[in-house]
Image (tube, grey):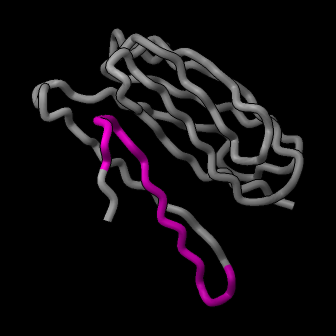
């Protein structure tokens, strides 16, 4: 059991390994509301990447992220491979129907493997919004 101390939108990870050693991941979003402001929806992130298949060492991978419910702060990417973090800023979803507004960055993995990518943003109330992605780099 885990208790969240700060309101926000969190992403938890489930790692599954079968008897042959194959690994896969799944994620679930947990939204924690501030009891002092129960009608205030915490900020959230939507992250995606492409290509999603046939990624090899050196392949440029484009990552996109967009914040919802806040225009304050910036997103910080951790690509899960030990490289430096990257900071970007989306528009905070001023117009939710606008296909633009995503912060975009590109990353290249040096080695094959399974990488868990983590992106987060802290809003003006100190609440965290985060998302996670699983990137598989082929040999």
- Judge by depth and name the residue closer to the eye, 102 or 82: 82
Q: Residue at x 82, y 38 (%)?
A: 108
Q: Across the whole image, how many numbered discs are drawn on residues?
A: 0
User: Does the segment drawn in magenta span residue 113?
Assistant: no
Q: Residue furthest front?
A: 5
Residue nearer the viewer, 115 or 129: 129
Viewer-closest of 37 and 42: 37
Task: Locate the C terminus by quadrant.
Answer: bottom right
Q: Is residue 95 above or below residue 19?
A: above
Q: Position of residue 32 (x, y in %)?
A: 25, 41
**Picture layout, residue 107 above or below residue 52:** above
Q: Is 120 left, or right, of 104 in this rendering? A: left
> Residue at (52%, 18%) from the top-left corner?
74
> In this rendering, would 30 be left or right of 76?
left
Q: Quadrant of the N terminus?
A: bottom left
Direction from residue 33 to residue 55 in the image, left or right: right
Residue 78: x, y in percent? Answer: 66, 38
Asked if the magenta segment contains residue 5, the reply would be: yes
Q: Residue at x 80, y 38 (%)?
A: 83
11 relative to 64 in the view: left or right: left
Residue most toward the bottom?
A: 19
Q: Which residue is painted at 66% across and 77% down in the image?
A: 22
Q: Which residues are magenta?
A: 4-21
């Amino acid at each position: 059991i885990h208790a969240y101390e700060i309101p926000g939108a969190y992403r938890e990870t489930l790692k599954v390994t079968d008897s042959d050693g194959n690994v896969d991941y799944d994620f679930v979003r947990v939204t924690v509301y501030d009891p002092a402001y129960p009608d205030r929806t915490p900020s959230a992130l939507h992250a995606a990447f492409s290509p999603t298949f046939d990624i090899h060492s050196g392949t440029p991978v484009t990552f996109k992220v967009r914040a919802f419910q806040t225009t304050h702060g910036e997103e910080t990417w951790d690509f899960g491979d030990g490289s430096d973090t990257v900071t970007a800023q989306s528009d905070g979803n001023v117009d939710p129907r606008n296909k633009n507004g995503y912060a975009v960055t590109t990353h290249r993995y040096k080695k094959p493997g399974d990488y868990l990518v983590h992106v987060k943003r802290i809003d003006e109330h100190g609440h965290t919004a985060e998302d996670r992605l699983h990137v598989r780099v082929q040999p």
